[in-house]
Image (cartoon, rainbow, N blue to C red):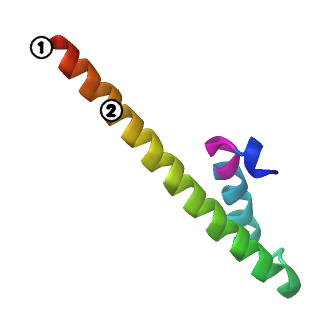
Amino acid sequence: MTKDKLTYEAAAAELAEITKELEADTITVDELSEKVKRGAYLINWCKARLKSTEDDIKTIMGDLDGAAD
């Protein structure tokens, strides 16, 4: 999946799949490093997306509060 098309839901689903593979011991030693790197990337991407969404909502709510005055 490319960065351009990544959504929060897709990232969360991919993280769930990686977790499932890790828990089931279906990942080879050769794949382990790449899966952990991808998982770390997805976690950071999701955190940034959540922060961005939170900031957007705060801005919108602040605009609404200002408009009510």
Q: Report the amino acid beneath label 2.
A: Thr
Residue nearest the observer in this picture, 33 or 56: 56
Q: Position of residue 46 (x, y in %)?
A: 56, 53
Q: Report the amino acid beneath label 1.
A: Asp
Task: Count neighbours of disc 2 (C-alpha within 10 A) and say few if under 14, some if 14 to 19, many if 20 or more.
Answer: few
Reply above or below: 18 against 53: below
Magenta part, dominant SS: helix
Q: Position of residue 27 (x, y in %)?
A: 83, 76
Q: Residue at x 67, y 42 (%)?
A: 7
Q: Residue at x 75, y 44 (%)?
A: 4
Farthest top residue in view: 68
Q: Which quarter of the figure has residue 38?
A: bottom right
Q: Which quarter of the figure has residue 8?
A: top right
Q: Residue at x 46, y 45 (%)?
A: 52
Q: Position of residue 20 (x, y in %)?
A: 72, 64
Q: Please indicate whether residue 36 sits to the left or right of residue 69 in the image.
A: right
Q: Position of residue 2 (x, y in %)?
A: 80, 51
Name which of mark 1 and mark 2 comes first in the sequence. 2
Q: Please indicate whether residue 67 sits to the left or right of residue 8 in the image.
A: left
Task: Count neighbours of disc 1 (C-alpha within 10 A) and say few if under 14, some if 14 to 19, many if 20 or more.
Answer: few
- Give yes or no for residue 65 being in the magenta stretch: no
Reply above or below: 49 against 37: above
Residue nearest the observer in this picture, 35 or 1: 1
Mark 2 element type: helix
Which of the labelled discs sits on residue 69, or is there none? Answer: 1
Residue nearest the observer in this picture, 20 or 48: 48
- The quadrant of the rendering that contains the C terminus is top left
Per the image, the residue denoted by label 2 is 59
Q: Which residues are magenta?
A: 7-11
Residue nearest the observer in this picture, 21 or 51: 51
Q: Please indicate whether residue 63 sits to the left or right of residue 18 in the image.
A: left
